[in-house]
Image (cartoon, rainbow, N blue to C red):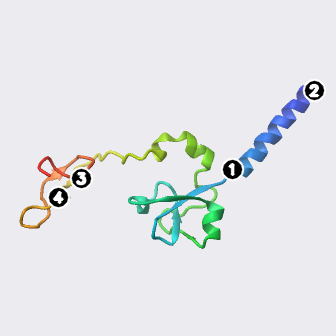
Amino acid sequence: MKSLKFLLLVLSFAFVNTMVAQTVYTTNTGEKYHKSSCGYLKYSKKEYTLEKAIELGFEACSVCKPTKSNTASTNANAFSSSENSSTPAKKTSATQCTGKTKAGKRCKRTTKNTSGRCYQH
């Protein structure tokens, strides 16, 4: 009886792992699908399964190269809080401020602020 239960448990895990859809992302205007860590998803992303994205005519990104083996599954994404959070990642290095001066030129100050703007903007 124990061996039968063990066999059923192993088979159920085998079927669950094959049935989990792979998640890829597209931009609102793009024609390619990406992994969740791709830089092209900075401003917009829509979530699709890999099969659905291919069915809709999207092609694989040539930068992040998403495949079935390296894209996250939907179950794995449910437990990954860092990839699913809607807050942007903190900047670790200083970048040039994105603010504009009165003359209409870009500010020359650097900032580590996550908004991309210095203390004055």
**Which percent across, then down, holds residue 98?**
20, 58
Q: Given the image, on which type of amino acid does mark 4 rest? A: Gly
Q: Nearer the viewer, residue 91 or 49?
A: 49
Q: Nearer the N terminus, badge 4 or badge 2?
A: 2
Image quadrant where residue 11 sits: top right
Q: Nearer the N terminus, badge 4 or badge 3?
A: 4
Q: Is label 1 in a helix, a strand or a loop?
A: loop
**Which percent across, then down, holds residue 113?**
23, 46
Nearest to viewer (mark 3 / mark 2):
3
Q: CA distance from mark 1 to mark 3?
A: 38 Å
Which residue is at 52% across, 58% downward?
Answer: 35
Near mark 4 (Cα within 10 A), the count class, few <14, some 14-19 or many ≥20, is some
Q: Are marks 1 and 3 in contact (CB under 8 Å)?
A: no
Residue, disc 3: 116
In the image, farthest residue toward the left: 103
Residue, disc 2: 1
Q: Given the image, on which type of amino acid does mark 3 rest? A: Gly
Q: CA distance from mark 4 to mark 2?
A: 70 Å
Residue, disc 4: 99
